[in-house]
Amino acid sequence: MNLDELYQTVILDHAQRPRNYGELPQATAFAEGNNPSCGDEVTVYVKLDANGEKIEDIKFKGAGCAISQASTSLMTVKLKGKTVAEASKFEKTFHDMMTAVTLPEYPQGFGDLQILEGVRKFPQRVKCATLGWNALKQALGGNSSHDPVTSENE
Ligand code: FES
């Protein structure tokens, strides 16, 4: 299977059967990401441990194209159990993979997130692939209190 076939297979699989889909009632923070060019939105929920250092659980909800759903689904699988520092590093690497002039060095464990690398050739789709990641960044970068990052869903 070449990279294009792998890309198709993984994207379709995660788009049709998104992992960690749904609300997370015990979330310690959440945030919405939206793609202004199409109006699609996802909400990412994270539950941090008592020290606020590790992602004990992560889920997402929302509608969007196959790339946005698959990218967010892959993100949740990858980040569950990671520290906030690791998750932030992955988020930055993912962002650089999409937008930096030169490809970043991939941290250990980045794994199949790398198959989305080809999206960088399609600028309109970059917003799709980063939709969930932008929400994650807001959720983690927000406060460390138990207040949700956005107030729209309160
Ligand atoms: Fe809306 Fe991709 S077309 S997120």
Image: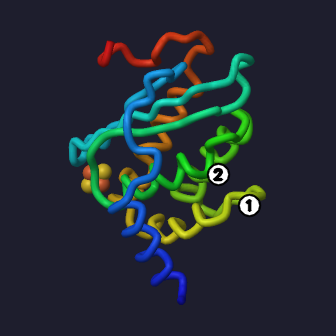
Which quadrant holds residue 39?
top left
* x, y percent for residue 52: 69, 20
Q: Quadrant of the C terminus?
A: top left
Q: Are marks 1 and 2 in contact (CB under 8 Å)?
A: yes
Alpha-carbon span between mark 1 and mark 2: 8 Å
For residue 93, side relative to residue 66 (left or right): right
Q: Is residue 41 above or below residue 54?
A: below
Numbered tag placed on residue 63 in the rendering: none
User: Percent from the top left, x then y, of residue 145?
Assistant: 59, 10
Percent of width and height locating residue 151: 35, 13
Mark sitting on residue 93: 2
Residue position for label 1: 105
How many numbered marks, from 0 up? 2
Q: Earlier in the sequence, mark 1 or mark 2?
A: 2
Task: Identify the residue at the far right of this view.
Answer: 108
Outermost residue toward the left in this view: 38
Label 2 sits on a secondary structure element that is helix
- Depth order, front residue of 48/120: 48
Residue 5 image position (x, y, % from top left): 46, 84
- Element at badge 1? loop
Residue drawn at 47 percent across, 38 percent down: 59
Of the pair 28 and 115, the residue shown nearer to us? 28
Q: Which residue type carries mark 1?
A: Glu
- What's the coloring here? rainbow
> Foreground: 109 or 106?
109
For image coordinates 44% across by 69% down, the residue present is 121
Binning the other alpha carbons within 10 Å of mark 1 as few (below 14), some (14 to 19) or many (20 upward) gives: few
Above or below for 24 versus 21: above
Q: Residues within 10 Å of mark 2 (few under 14, many from 20)?
A: many
